[in-house]
Amino acid sequence: MKKTLLVLLTCFLTQSTFADPTFTNLSEDDFNQISKDMSANFTHGSILGASKMGTVVGVQVGLIGMQTNAKSTNEIVKRNAGAELPSLYNGGILVAVGVPFGLAAEAVLFPKMTASGASLNSTSLAIKYNINDVIPVLPINLALRGVYSTSGFSFSQTQSGVTTSVEDKNSVSGLQILISPMIPIVEPYLGFGMLSSSNELTATGSAIFDPSYTSSQSQKKTNSSTQTLVGVDVSLLLLKMGVEYSTAFGTDRYAFKFALGF
């Protein structure tokens, strides 16, 4: 499991440090675009539909991997250093537990790891409530899910001979509505949500922001966004697999799941 996590981290860091990308002379719009891409990347994602987890109690443990389109951030990185950052990556260990009354708790955990001079950690949590017991005549599965995530990503860059440490901290919270048909084994689902995010970018060393924007070494940006989810969750006895597409904060994300459970 830890080796697989290291592979996920290596993918993220390889993209993030290829050709020594740097953040310099960031305008307010640049920072806003970076904040949106980071928020879309680290929003909670478990690839679980609207149905209950098990008839009484259900458990899933496995791996989640995610790839986010970072087109806006890529343009900024290319302008600053001629490097490429077409995608951001996220993932971790999925743990989900369902209990009676349609309640379920979810967590996706990525412990702090360091490679190639960069480090990454993320934690996302969710509480889901399937309301079919309250409204038993519904012909579909319907659930509400509250989500919350935090993450930290840091790396070093050199500009004008000065080594600068750059750290990005992000948090996202929100509420989703999930809908899926009442069919066994394969559960396609659709979701809609409202998200709110906070992103803080800090530099220690050289300035990374455009002086006409700010003279500070640290800036924070908040954003809000709608979210759309489309996914498929497959249950083959103890084996659980799934894929999901989501769009939020103006960008797209693709995710996959491989887990065991009952």
Image (cartoon, rainbow, N blue to C red):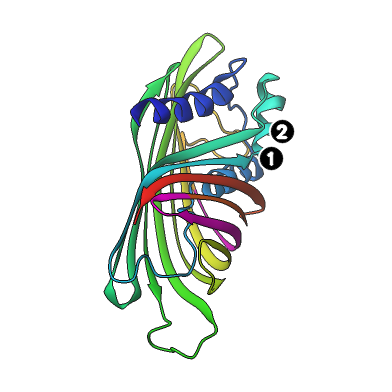
Residue occupying the far front of the picture: 237
Q: How far is the residue under mark 1 from the one under mark 2?
A: 5 Å
Residue that mark 1 sits on = 72
Q: Quadrant of residue 17?
A: top right
Residue 207 in the image: x percent, y percent? Answer: 52, 26
Residue that mark 2 sits on = 75
1 and 2 marks in contact (CB < 8 Å): yes
Residue occupying the far top of the picture: 161
Left or right: 208 with respect to 27?
left
Residue 104 in the image: x percent, y percent? Answer: 33, 66
Please say if 220 is above or below 59: above
Amino acid under disc 2 = Glu
Residue 230 in the image: x percent, y percent? Answer: 62, 60
Helix, strand or loop for disc 2: helix
For image coordinates 62% across by 15% down, the residue present is 19
- Classify 10 Å Cα crowding around label 2: few (below 14), some (14-19), many (20 and above): some
Left or right: 244 with respect to 236?
right
For image coordinates 63% across by 45% down, the residue present is 33
Q: Which segment is the magenta one?
A: 221-240
Indicate the quadrant containing the C terminus: top left, top right, bottom left or bottom right: bottom left
